C-alpha cells in the first residue's frame, strides 16, 4: 500500500484542490494526508542501481587585485550514486567541481548580522533537510555552505567525500556525510562529518538527533585538541489533525577548554486553523556556543569603534498571530485578507531588553494571484556595540553610531502582480526612522516570459539612510538583470548581471549549457568582477566543463 494524493492547481479560476481531502491549514503536499494506492502484487525490487558521472574541466583566469598573470588550469573528478536497497543512496564525489553552479545573488544588508544565502551546490542538495533541518532559521547547527570555506568565508579546495542517506525503514531516516577539504595557506586540511537520525513516533511526531565533527589534519594525522563538535536532540509533536505542534530541543558545541555556557535550546508550540494561527517560541543561546559547521546569526557583535568582536549571549521570545478573513460573497475578487503580528523580544542574560520589534501587517490576497500588503514596525534597540554601515575607514570623519538606546518607527508596503501573466511586477518600500536617522528604501522586480524562448527579469533596490552630523549618510544601489534564452530543449543560455554599491562589486555570470545526451552536459561559464567605485577589474574566469552520465 502506497500513500498517494493528486493536486490540481487551477490558476485560471484560483482553485487549489486535492483528490484526498487535506485540511485547509495544511499544505496540500503534506504526506500526513494521503489516499491509499493498493498494489495487487508488490512492486518488483531493483538491485544494482548505480550512476557514475565523470567530469573534466579547463579554466582560464586572472586575478587583477593580486597582480597575477593569466593562469590556465585543468582538472577532473567523478561523482557516483549507488542505490542500497529501495530506500538508501550512497553518493560519492572525488575532486568535486561546482564551476557551473550559478553565483550567489548579492543582497543589501542593513543589519549588524550576517545573512544566510542558500546552498546551490548539487552534491549538498539531496536530502538536505535531513542534515540542515535542525534548529530554527536564525540558528542552524549544520549549514552545508560552511564546507569548503575557512572561518573568514574564503574558499578551500574540497578533495572528496561521501553521503549515505535515505530511509532505513518506514519510520527511520538516517544520514552520514563526510567531506575532506585540502590545506590552503595557514588553514589546515580538515575533515567535516555529519551524522543525523530522524525517527517517526506516534504517527506524525519525530525524535531527531545529530552529531557534527570538524577535525584538523597535519601530515595526514589528526591534530589533538584541534576539533569543533556539535550534538543535539529535537522532539517535535504534531497532532493527528495537524492543528497543534510543539517542540523542544537541546544543542551543544564542544571545543578544547570550553565546558560552560556552550549550549542553546528552544521550545515552543504552534496552532493553525482555517482562520487563525499562532506561533510561540522561547530560546536561549549561551556565550560559548559555536556553530563552526552551521549558521548562528547574532551571538557575535562587531564593535566598529574598538575593531573588536564581542560574543554576547541572549534569550529571545518570538510570537506571531495570523488572522484570516474570508469574503461571504463568492463573486468577490478577494480570496481572503489577513492581519499578521510577528513580534521578537531579545533579552540579555540579566533580563534587560536587547531588542524588541513588533510588526503589524495587513495583506489582501486576490483571486487573480496578486497581493497587496502594508506594515507598521516599531523598534526598540539597546545597541550593545558601536555600529557602522558605510565602509569609510576614517572614524573621525564618519564615526559609527554609538552604543545606547534607540527607539524608531517604520512603515512599509508591497504590491505583487498577477504571477500567471507573462508580465509580472513586484514593488515595495520602507520609510521612517532608522536608529538616530531616517530610512527610505524602494524595491522593484519586473519580469516577462517570452514563452517558450526567453525569460527576462530585472530586480532593483535603492536604500537611502540619512543621519545627523557628525554621522555620514549612506546610499546603496543593487541592480540585478537576468536573461534566460532557450535555443532548444537541450540548449540554453543564462546571463546574470549584478551591480551592488554596498559590496563595491559589478559582476557578470554567463553560462551556456548543452545537454548533449540524457543527464550529460557541456558547460561554458564566464565570470567577471569589477570594483564599482574605481571601476577597475577584480578578476575574470572562463571555464569549460564536460560531464558524462553512465
Image (cartoon, rainbow, N blue to C red):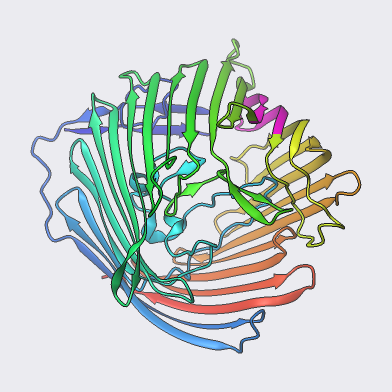
Residue 476 magenta-drawn? no
Q: Is residue 258 above or below residue 190?
A: above
Q: Is residue 40 above or below residue 394?
A: above
Q: Residue at position x 29%, y 56% from top?
A: 177
The residue lying furthest to the front in this view is 257
Q: Split into 4 quadrants, where in the image is the N terminus?
A: top left
Q: Residue at position x 29%, y 75% from top?
A: 220
Q: Which image quadrant is residue 178 in?
A: bottom left
Q: Range of the magenta residues?
A: 354-381
Q: Tell whether 482 sits left or right of 386.
A: left
Q: Split into 4 quadrants, where in the image is the C terminus?
A: bottom left
Say whether residue 519 is visible. no
Q: Nearer the viewer, residue 299 or 498?
A: 299
Q: Nearer the viewer, residue 372 or 120?
A: 120
Residue 369 magenta-drawn? yes
Q: Nearer the viewer, residue 334 or 337?
A: 337
Q: Residue at position x 33%, y 55% from top?
A: 213
Horizontal and vertical percent for residue 501? Answer: 75, 60
Q: Tell whether 152 sits left or right of 306.
A: left
The residue lying furthest to the left in this view is 41
Q: Residue at position x 67%, y 37% from top?
A: 417
Which SS does the magenta portion mostly show?
A: strand
Say whether residue 541 is visible. yes
Count how many numbered circles sit on residues in the image. 0
Q: Is residue 212 above or below residue 246?
A: below
Horizontal and vertical percent for residue 53? Answer: 30, 70
Horizontal and vertical percent for residue 338? Answer: 61, 21
Q: Nearer the viewer, residue 145 or 468?
A: 468
The residue lying furthest to the top in this view is 328
Amino acid at each position: 500500500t502506497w500513500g498517494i494524493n493528486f493536486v490540481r492547481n487551477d490558476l485560471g479560476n484560483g482553485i487549489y484542490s486535492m483528490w484526498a481531502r487535506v485540511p485547509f491549514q495544511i499544505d496540500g503536499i503534506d504526506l500526513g494526508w494521503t489516499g491509499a494506492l493498493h498494489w495487487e502484487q508488490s512492486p518488483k525490487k531493483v538491485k544494482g542501481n548505480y550512476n557514475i558521472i565523470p567530469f573534466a574541466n579547463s579554466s582560464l583566469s586572472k586575478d587583477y587585485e593580486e597582480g597575477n598573470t593569466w593562469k590556465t588550469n585543468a582538472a577532473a573528478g567523478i561523482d557516483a550514486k549507488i542505490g542500497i536497497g529501495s530506500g538508501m543512496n550512497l553518493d560519492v564525489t572525488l575532486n568535486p567541481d561546482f564551476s557551473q553552479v550559478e553565483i550567489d545573488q548579492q543582497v543589501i544588508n542593513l543589519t549588524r548580522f550576517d545573512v544566510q544565502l542558500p546552498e546551490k551546490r548539487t552534491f549538498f542538495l539531496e536530502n538536505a533537510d535531513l542534515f540542515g533541518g535542525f534548529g530554527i532559521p536564525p540558528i542552524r547547527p549544520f549549514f552545508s555552505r560552511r564546507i569548503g570555506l575557512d572561518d573568514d568565508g574564503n574558499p578551500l579546495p574540497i578533495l572528496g567525500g561521501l553521503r549515505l542517506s535515505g530511509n532505513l525503514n518506514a519510520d527511520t531516516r538516517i544520514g552520514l556525510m563526510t567531506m575532506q577539504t585540502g590545506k590552503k595557506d595557514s588553514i589546515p586540511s580538515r575533515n567535516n562529518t555529519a551524522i543525523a537520525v530522524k525517527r517517526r513516533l506516534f504517527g506524525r511526531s519525530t525524535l531527531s538527533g545529530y552529531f557534527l565533527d570538524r577535525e584538523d589534519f597535519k601530515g595526514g594525522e589528526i591534530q589533538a585538541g584541534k576539533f569543533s563538535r556539535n550534538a543535539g536532540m529535537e522532539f517535535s509533536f504534531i497532532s493527528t489533525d495537524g492543528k497543534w505542534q510543539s517542540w523542544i530541543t537541546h544543542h551543544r558545541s564542544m571545543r578544547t577548554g570550553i565546558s560552560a555556557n556552550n549550549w542553546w535550546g528552544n521550545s515552543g508550540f504552534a496552532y493553525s486553523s482555517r482562520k487563525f494561527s499562532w506561533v510561540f517560541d522561547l530560546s536561549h543561546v549561551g556565550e560559548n556556543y559555536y556553530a563552526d559547521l552551521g549558521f548562528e546569526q547574532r551571538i557575535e557583535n562587531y564593535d566598529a569603534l574598538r575593531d573588536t568582536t564581542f560574543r554576547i549571549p541572549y534569550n529571545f521570545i518570538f510570537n506571531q498571530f495570523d488572522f484570516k478573513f474570508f469574503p461571504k460573497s463568492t463573486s468577490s475578487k478577494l480570496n481572503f485578507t489577513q492581519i499578521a503580528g510577528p513580534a521578537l523580544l531579545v533579552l540579555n542574560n540579566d533580563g534587560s531588553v536587547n531588542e524588541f520589534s513588533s510588526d503589524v501587517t495587513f495583506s489582501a490576497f486576490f483571486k487573480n494571484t496578486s497581493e497587496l500588503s502594508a506594515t507598521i514596525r516599531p523598534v526598540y534597540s539597546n545597541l550593545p556595540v558601536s555600529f557602522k554601515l558605510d565602509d569609510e575607514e576614517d572614524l573621525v570623519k564618519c564615526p559609527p553610531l554609538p552604543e545606547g538606546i534607540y527607539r524608531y518607527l517604520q512603515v512599509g508596503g508591497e504590491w505583487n502582480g498577477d504571477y500567471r501573466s507573462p508580465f509580472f511586477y513586484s514593488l515595495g518600500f520602507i520609510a521612517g526612522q532608522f536608529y538616530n536617522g531616517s530610512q527610505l528604501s524602494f524595491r522593484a522586480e519586473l519580469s516577462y516570459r517570452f514563452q517558450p524562448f526567453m525569460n527576462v527579469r530585472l530586480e532593483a533596490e535603492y536604500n537611502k539612510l540619512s543621519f545627523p552630523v557628525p554621522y555620514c549618510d549612506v546610499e546603496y544601489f543593487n541592480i540585478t538583470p537576468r536573461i534566460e534564452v532557450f535555443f532548444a530543449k537541450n540548449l540554453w543560455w543564462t546571463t546574470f548581471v549584478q551591480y551592488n554599491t554596498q559590496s563595491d562589486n559589478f559582476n557578470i555570470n554567463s553560462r551556456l549549457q548543452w545537454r548533449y545526451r540524457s543527464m550529460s552536459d557541456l558547460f561554458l561559464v564566464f565570470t567577471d568582477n569589477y570594483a564599482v567605485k574605481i571601476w577597475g577589474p577584480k578578476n575574470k574566469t572562463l571555464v569549460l566543463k564536460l560531464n558524462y552520465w553512465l
